[in-house]
Image (spheres, rainbow, N blue to C red):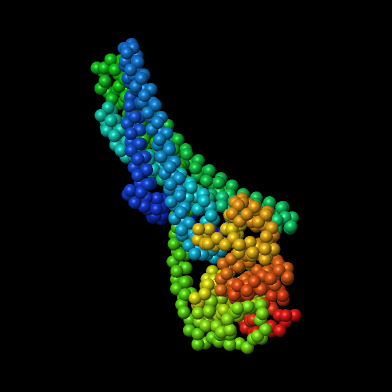
Amino acid sequence: MSSEGGHARLSSDSKYSFDIVFIKRFLRLFRLMFPRWLSVTSLLSFFLLLLSLLEQVIIFNIGLLPSEYYKVLGNKDVDGFRSNTIKAVLLILVEAFMKSTILYVSSVLYVTWRSMLTVALHRRYFYDIIYYRLNVLDKAIDNPDQRITQDVDKLCNFFSLIIAPLIISPFTIGYYVYQASVRTGYIGPVSVVVFFILATIINKFLMSPVVRSVFHQKRREGDFRFKHMQIRVNAESAAFYRSGVTEEKKANQKLHDLIKVQHKLIRRQYALNFSIKAADYLGSILSYIAIAVPVFAGSYDSLSAEQLSALISQNAFVTIYLISCFTKLIDLSSQVTNMAGNAHRVGELFEVLGRLKDAQSEDYSFLEETMPSSDLVPLSDVNLDTDREFLEGAADTVSQTNMALRLQDVTYGPPKSSQILCRNLNFQLESGINILVTGDSGCGKSSLLRVINGLWSSITGHVARGSKAVFYLPQRPYFTDGTLREQIIYPLRSDECVQHDDKMYQYLDLVGLKYLIDRIGGLDVAVDWNWYDELSPGEMQRLAFVRLYYHQPPFAALDESTSQIGVNIEEQLYRQCAELNITVMSVGHRESVRRFHDMELHLDGQGGWTMTPIRQDVINA
């Protein structure tokens, strides 16, 4: 779900740069990526570093090959040329093997890290109803779906590419500084180090703006992607309005916002790329300047032409490779900025999920309290008509153990809003007493179910739950991906429940959906379609009742659950609830549902409410 409404609550751009905030966020991710010293990722990383160091040894020997060729060619040494060529071929093949192995290990690390971080995010994201609070109520960050599916992927990919060069660079730089000082004196290594420090300082100032731009580009990418996902999910509804022109303008506006940010990112990357490329080429010139000093000073005048050429070749390789070690670090700036931008987004998501989890734990601290019953009159004490054949097997008396929930002086309204939907609501849901919640649209009927379920917090008062669970059928039934069986047993998994195929067939036949078996091919046939595209609204509501019957809970809350179903089937559905001893609390407008309920809770939309009996003498009419 898009979170544009939450964009205004984001911090300023200065929040996303190379600073203490980035370090804290990255260290938290680092601990998840390396949970133990002997974890798989730790061992793979050590192996990757070992391979990278061995590769440097091979590269060093390959770099000395030209000087050997200068000698053997200058002296016309055929045997030396042959052995040098064999050595060169072997070294090149070993280097190719090492390079390929390094890339393979890096890819394995990337995939493993992605799995670990995504699983860690899923554990927090799907904790109870955190995903609902993040997408619907809190909206503190943009596009959590993009952060989980894409930003984690790019973070792990970039980090797998830069971890080895970043760690082994101090070792290779130290080694080649020593080699350069032996061959050219202090002038060569000192000039290279000074050059690198200056380039690093310049790049530091150029990288932070790029990090911020990468962060905001990801956000706009998510907004643009969500717009197209919105059209894909609601294509038929939009088509009825013939709203192509309007949606085109809205989609183009999202694209315009994205392109605008991308242009800003490109401009900032231009300056960074100029600095990186200038450092690369100036570094190559600097290497020859460092070599020229001892040559012009006469330090090698005693050598022959062949020896001097070989020595210059060796010195050139050492100094140039030292420059290369530094410039590789500078070249990594682009990947580091991308990694940092994604690290900010993923780290921020972890922070918000942690905050929401702590807040939810506090909310639940009072939802689970046992409320005193002295101020409430049980609905079973109300004088109701005794003709209730549709409630076969219902208990004549209601005890505390048969209570689903109790509301005491509950005042509620939309989160982060001053609007009051209902004040000081008192009632309890007991076994055998069906309640019908009525009122005009927008008066707070569905909101009451959200408060009862814990999706919303009440402003005042308490919601106490009894020992019996309540099964909810939301206004729009939810269907996951998977088989027909998985839709029926949801939210359970196949390995969590006993197979009751006969009951499933019976209930599908009862609601008029037995043809789905033939259409799909069976309960366990995998389908790749979207259930919302394949089923009509009425079919979805009837399938939701099959799910209800399968679970057979003692209590159920139905939110307009028969609004798309005919009156005759509606009667069958409610009678089946009675046969299964399911006490229902229904939100509904249709007059036809009244006769299946004992009490009416009416909300007037102004904060007031009444609880009155419903006459049952029309049940047999």
Residue 312 location, x and y as percent?
A: 32, 22
User: Who is closer to the viewer here, 315 or 231?
Assistant: 231
Please name the residue shown 47% across and 72% down the image. 364
In this picture, residue 28 sits left or right of residue 248: left
Q: Is residue 362 above or below residue 520?
A: below
Which residue lies at the image location 34% right of the left edge and 19% below the top edge? 84
Q: Is residue 73 above or below residue 283?
A: above
In this rendering, the answer to whether 23 lies above or below 299 is below
In this orientation, which residue lies closer to the viewer: 614 or 139? 614
In the rendered view, tell whether residue 147 sits above or below residue 566.
Answer: above
In the image, 97 versus 413, the foreground residue is 97
Give the image location of residue 527, x and y in percent: 61, 51
Quadrant of the image for the C terminus?
Answer: bottom right
In this rendering, would 175 be left or right of 361?
left
Viewer-proximal residue, 384 or 319? 384
Q: Residue at x 50, y 85 (%)?
A: 373
Q: Residue furthest front?
A: 502
The answer to whether one can see residue 296 in this image is: no
Residue 128 position within the rendered picture, expressed as x and y whole percent measured from the top left: 49, 64
Where residue 601 sits: x, y (%)? 63, 80
The residue drawn where x is 57% and y is 58% is 486
Q: Quadrant of residue 300?
A: top left
Quadrant the N terminus occupies: bottom right
Within the image, what quadrant is residue 296 found in? top left
Residue 128 appears in view: yes
Q: Total label count?
A: 0
